[in-house]
Image (cartoon, helix red, strand yellow):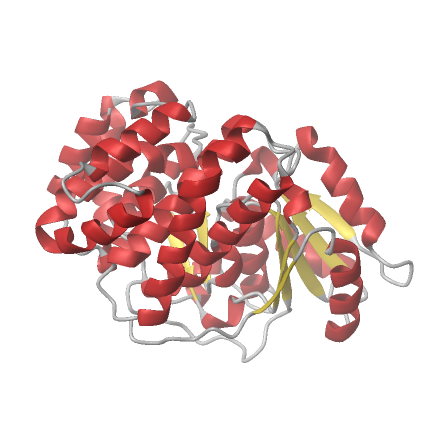
Amino acid sequence: MSLISYVTKIHFAENLLEDAIEVELELLGLRRPLIISDNGAGRRGIVDRLLETIPRSVSALLYEIPAGRATEEACLEAATLFADWEADGVIGFGGASAINLAKAVTLCIGHSGPPHKYAGLGGRSASTRQTVPPVIAVPTIAGSCFETVSVAILSMRDGRVMSLVNPLIMPRVVICDPTLTLDLPARQTAGAGMDALTHCIETYIATAYNPPADGIARDGLRRVIAHIERAVADGSDLAARREMMAAALNGALAHQKGLGGVHAMSHALGGLAGKSLEHGAVNAVLLPLVLEFNAPAVAARYDEIKQEFGLPPRADLCEAIIRLRERIALPACLGDMGIEAGDLERAAVSAEADYSNRTNPRHAAASDYLSMLQAAL
């Protein structure tokens, strides 16, 4: 990619949700927003907090994603609900699924046919309206990265995972309030943190030329390493929560440079029928293997990453990541998460076709991905 564009409006502070939502709804002229959430019953407190924040002059409708996954069926269902409600905008409230779905829904509004018809796929793009309903993205987990990118990922009915790429779906506003992550359990905090770490590392070594993204990624990497274990050990540590949300935002802003093989494989695995995988935990298993694969192409950059880890030049970066994964109690292999050997060949083919593979620093074919997946099993 050659485009460098930092144009998304971002609010970032503790306890700003209430003020920021009211202000942005007014500025965008939204009176009937559809709220899309993937927080589930276990996080009802923050959902209620958002609903109580909506001004009395605004009528909002809540759509909670079935099974918490951004699927083609959920997208079409939410788009129908948007039309029936006569909504005028979308609030994506949650993690990757909620924000992905919020963006994808806007493409369905006023367009016929399946959602992927109106997004760039494999270098193609179909005609879309010049405007779509506005999206306000409110992350409630520090790690998804989808709040500041013009990409939405959906699991399709035929089993594929589609990356819908279209500049129109970039959220107009992002509201980052670290207090929305205080209730997140340790396991989810660990997975989200490793997702943020992976975003920062993969963008830093991606092939595109984007010096601002490199600086942002290194800063995010530094924040993850300094605070992830504190956030996992004590979820009430607001300072650690703030720094982890800042690191996640850095990874999201650097994302425009492109990702790599870890996300190519985790996207593919996420589309497996009947699987409900923790994306960050999957990344934590795959990251050392992809770094080992990519070393012949970008080993020089590993020395800079080691500096952020506080490691000496001769230290093994992959081993350091494995030890970090162990300390925050994430699974050591894909088999521990329900992946089976029969799943791998299809996932490897999908990984080669994934948009993240385009900026992996070393060319990776399906056979390379199959070898890494087998090693991760």
Q: Quadrant of the C terminus?
A: top left
**Point 36% across, 29% down: residue:** 325
Looking at this view, name the residue that lies furthest to the right. 56
Q: Position of residue 43 (x, y in %)?
A: 68, 33
**Point 11% across, 54% down: residue:** 297
Q: Is residue 207 visible?
A: yes
Judge from the rendering whether residue 56 lies leftward or rightward of residue 119; answer left or right: right
Q: Position of residue 69 (x, y in %)?
A: 52, 39
Judge from the rendering whether residue 208 lies leftward or rightward of residue 155; answer left or right: left
**Point 30% across, 43% down: residue:** 310
Looking at this view, name the residue that lies furthest to the bottom. 130
Q: Position of residue 324 (x, y in %)?
A: 35, 31
Closer-to-camera residue (81/332): 332
Judge from the rendering whether residue 189 lies leftward or rightward of residue 361; answer left or right: right
Judge from the rendering whether residue 340 lies leftward or rightward of residue 87; answer left or right: left
**Point 53% across, 48% down: residue:** 243
Looking at this view, name the residue that lies furthest to the left. 296
Q: Is residue 355 visible?
A: no
Q: Position of residue 364 (x, y in %)?
A: 14, 49
Q: Quadrant of the N terminus?
A: bottom left
Count up the numbered dots. Answer: 0
Up/down of 198 relative to 117, above or below: above
Up/down of 362 relative to 94, above or below: below
Q: Quadrant of residue 272?
A: top left
